[in-house]
Amino acid sequence: EPEVTQTPSHQVTQMGQEVILRCVPISNHLYFYWYRQILGQKVEFLVSFYNNEISEKSEIFDDQFSVERPDGSNFTLKIRSTKLEDSAMYFCASSERQKNTEAFFGQGTRLTVV
Amino acid sequence: AQTVTQSQPEMSVQEAETVTLSCTYDTSESDYYLFWYKQPPSRQMILVIRQEAYKQQNATENRFSVNFQKAAKSFSLKISDSQLGDAAMYFCAYRSAGHTSGTYKYIFGTGTRLKVLA
């Protein structure tokens, strides 16, 4: 069964460093998303991406964040200068269409900023 | 703005028994989707069941079923014949159909931790 794949599963980084979280969406999906879950809290929407541009973003998704689809398969989330409060589980999701379909989530990347 | 509320931070159920997890939501839209996701200790998000708001019939998936009350904006999950593997965090989620809001993001509740007792 097709699945969304995220790498790495766990990333530890020093405060102020840049990190790139990677996702391989399901191959025929066109819509991509990043969500974040701070430990013990609910899952929060960060950004959605379609046709090589951001279609929607939340207030969390500030200038420190960026997304990119560098090739036909990967979808990345970059945090330019990590802060302690960026420590969270980051989920990538993809969907075939926007309407009438659900998004499939990856297994998540646990980001720890020290 | 849409909101999702899960008022039960934690629930326990005896193995083989039935448990119901509550979820309420608030929206002014008439067309939307509702989901229950399971998050085991591995923290992966696994879709359990989905419900389209335009469907009156409650969705079922094997031992999992929902009680969707559109007028009351309630969407509870019933797990029958609970198994040890059902122990996890369960999140209720709302997603607009996008006709009026133009948004397709998921809005999650705070989750209910389900413990299954042997």
Image (cartoon, coloured by chain):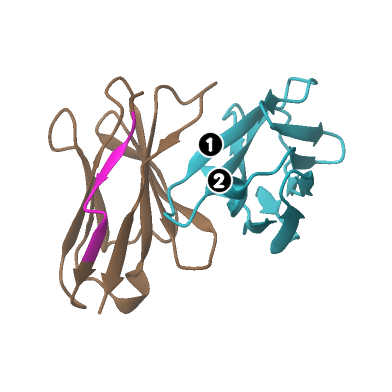
Chain colours: A brown, B cyan
Disc 1 marks which residue? B47
Kindly check if marks 2 and 1 are in contact, taking CB atoms under 8 A apart as contact.
yes
- The span picked out in magenta is A3-11
Whether residue B101 is visible, yes or no, is: no
Q: Residue placed at 29% from the left, 70% from the top?
A: A112
Q: Is residue B58 magenta?
A: no
- In the figure, is residue B8 to the left or right of A15? right
- In the figure, is residue B52 to the left or right of A63? right
Q: Chain of mark 2?
A: B
Task: Classify mark 1: helix, strand or loop.
Answer: strand
The answer to whether marks 2 and 1 sit on the same chain is: yes
Q: Residue placed at 47% from the left, 45% from the top?
A: B45
Q: Is residue A7 magenta?
A: yes
Q: Quadrant of residue B11?
A: bottom right
| Residue B76 position within the rendered picture, expressed as x and y whole percent measured from the top left | 77, 42
Task: Classify mark 2: helix, strand or loop.
Answer: strand
The residues tagged by marks 2 and 1 sit, at their Cα atoms, a distance apart of 6 Å
Closer to us: B103 or B80: B80
**Three-letter amino acid code at the position of disc 1:** Leu
Mark 1 Cα-neighbour bin, 10 Å: few <14, some 14–19, many ≥20? some
Mark 2 Cα-neighbour bin, 10 Å: few <14, some 14–19, many ≥20? many
| Residue A67 position within the rendered picture, expressed as x and y whole percent measured from the top left | 25, 47
Q: Quadrant of the C terminus of chain A?
A: bottom left
| Residue A52 position within the rendered picture, expressed as x and y whole percent measured from the top left | 24, 33
